[in-house]
Amino acid sequence: MKDQLFATMQRIGRAFMLPIAILPVAGLFLGIGGSFTNETMLKNFGLLGAMGPGTIPNAIFQVMNAAGGIVFSNLPIIFAIAVALAMARQNKAVAALSGAIGFFVMHASIGAVMTIRYGSEALAACRAANSAGGAMPAGCLPAGSYADVVGIPSLQMGVFGGIIVGLGVAALHNRFHNIQLPQVLSFFGGERFVPIISAITYLIVGIAMAFLWPYVQMGINQLGALVRSSGYGGTLIYGIIERSLIPFGLHHVFYLPFWQTSVGGTLDVCGKSIQGAQNIFFAQLGCPTVTHFDVEATRFMAGKFPFMIFGLPGAALAMYQAAAPKNKKVAGSLLLSAALTAMLTGITEPLEFTFLFVAPMLYVIHAILAGISFMLMHILNVGVGMTFSGGLIDLTLFGILQGPSKTNWYWIPIVGVFYFFIYYFLFKFMIAKFNLKTPGREEDEDEIKLYGRSDVDAKTGRNTSVGSSSAGDAGASGSANQNIDKDTLLAARVVKGLGGAGNITDVDNCITRLRTEVKDSSLVDEQLLKATGAAGVMSSGRGVQVIYGPRVTAVANAVHQFLEHPVDVDLDGSGDVAAAEAPTAAAVAADRHVATIVRAPLSGEVIPMSEVEDKAFADGLVGPGVAIRPSSTTVESPCDGTVMLLFPTKHAVGIKTDTGVELLIHIGLDTVKLNGEGFEAHVETGQIVEQGQPLISFDPERIEAAGYRLTTPVVVTNAATVGQPEVVAGDHVKAGNGLLVIP
């Protein structure tokens, strides 16, 4: 239960990263647009004549300001769509559409119930008073309770509303995306059922929320009041917890309520009630009457700047100084790169995970210093906000350019200088005192890199068989991989390290980590994953995180590409096959044991033969194989071979491969009863075909309208002679990708 909860929280945190990823761009638009349309700033820098009102640059910056503002104004629906998209396991586009539908239906239902309950005139009066920011009339909900959500009069649910919809729709989608309805309703089955059930569900949820959410909102407001009343001590605790959750990947789940809901405060900005620390900051950024950014909001953000821009580079310098003389050049280049990354962008994990895995006590000290940094920025009234990081880019846009009178940004470098020396001397002392094995510290070190748990294991003799990632790419693959690019080799190693393609149920990434979910965590090979260049691997239940740093996006793309288009990669000299090019007849003649690769004749969802809704196929009476619920409409030849049989009704075709494997592709179930209606054949019996050549086209809507399922079995009819097939495809497959292997 504990592991499952942790894995679920990791998935939720990963889902939050998708909508959060747009915030830096929106923040840049707001920061640049707000700064260069602020007349006070333009006067201070002597730019009023060139960029003041009426000039072309001013018009451009106004557009940028509006473009950034619209994102922050509509974060709830962005979260609803993005969370549903990220949490869905398959058919993600359907989940995203259903998320939008559920969001609209829920808020429309809330608005309708509120109108019926209170009356249109009384409700209008409450909303008008809420918008004006004055005293609320008798019988109204507290100020800030009402909102227009994408133009729909509703309650102020903030991003919580979007998250409620996104998580719920994802659960409905994962449960019902392949549902089979009775024949009379079969048109509405499968993925079409998801938006239907989402609309019905959130109609009910909307009705319930109209009565329940005001009480939930009062509880959230009370929690926010408690946080704000906690003063500097509360800010200290917030900073320590936020940094402590980084290794577990749960920090997004922790800080999001502070940044995006009333837990982080509620403030009237330019006549509008704004909830959430980050929302308050960016609303003030676009409000010309604000004289100082609200520190009660920025207390949850400004503390990152001193330790990210100054503190961690001090730690990097300490690790450089601790390196052996002959290793200083290599260690210095690595640490300088990581320090600059932290300073400029606020991406700190390459440094943090180095000393986290080498000496956890250093990370404990780091978390405490981070908390103190948050508290000091609160005490010093620093009003600098951010998008998602605490680097120089955000400091320049949201601090320096806004002016010292609005931000007190000058305290950041003042405190930062002290933090640089504190980190430097403290880390240098700890490294020397406890002989911590930071990069390049040992004279005989063969390879110097930012440390992870794999390096510690290697030095204690537990990883002696695993070389560096560069060596592995060049050597272990052998001659079998001469024509395979480095990205594919890397992806193949990652997939194998995760237990193989069949063990992986979900792959995604955040800024620095490959976040995956597997069927069986015992199959995960941490040493192999670390040999790919990962700084560390963290497993909890079915959730596995592999830390790669800023290059993780490239790794994730390579893994996705490999899973969608698997190729033959020999990782250990044993001929390990993920999926390969179909063998030629000459190769078979030379070696009778070469596997026959059967390609997918259709794109679609892969289902076990035992789950086919036809007893003859499900019980294996026709033969072993696998079935596809198609998303394409043309059956392609799965191999080079000969058409053995084309049924007169054109609903099935038999192929014999050049290696002697006999295949039957049966389009739909009971479709023989259609007598060829909805099918068009492109080949004839006895014809020689090539892999990928069109065999039969079909009209799925016509077949489903007639009440027949499209499930298409692909069967090996002579398995007793050639051997049992093994499924190599994942949950979904594209036409032409590997589907079956017959050893």
Image (tube, helix red, strand yellow):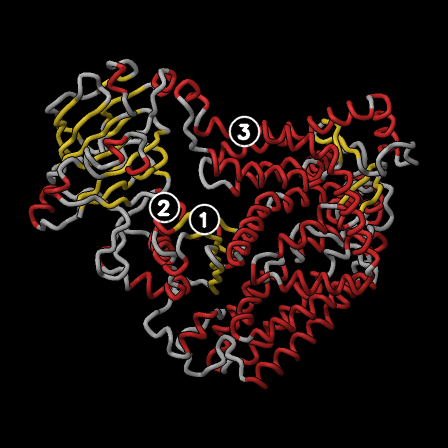
| Left or right side of 454 for 643 | left
* Residue at which label 3 appears: 197
Task: Give the vertical position of 726 relative to 618 (above or below).
Answer: below
Task: Give the vertical position of 542 relative to 133 (above or below).
Answer: below
Q: Closer to the N terminus: mark 3 or mark 2? A: 3
Task: Give the vertical position of 702 relative to 367 (above or below).
Answer: above
Q: Whole-percent x and y of residue 160?
A: 68, 42
The reply to whether residue 105 is visible in this rendering is yes
For badge 2, the amino acid type reads: Leu
Gap in angstroms between the C-alphas marked 2 and 1:
10 Å
Relative to the observer, which residue lies in front, 280 or 94? 94
Relative to the observer, which residue lies in front, 95 or 559? 95
Q: Closer to the N terminus: mark 3 or mark 1? A: 3
* Residue at which label 1 appears: 507
Label 2 secondary element: helix
* Residue at which label 2 appears: 563
Farthest residue in the bottom direction?
Answer: 433
Q: Give the residue at x 70% y 35%.
A: 209
Residue 603 in which image quadrant: top left
Q: Nearer the viewer, mark 3 or mark 2?
A: 3
Gap in angstroms between the C-alphas marked 3 and 2:
31 Å
Q: Whole-percent x and y of residue 294?
A: 82, 51
Q: Whole-percent x and y of residue 644?
A: 12, 27
Residue 168 in which image quadrant: top right
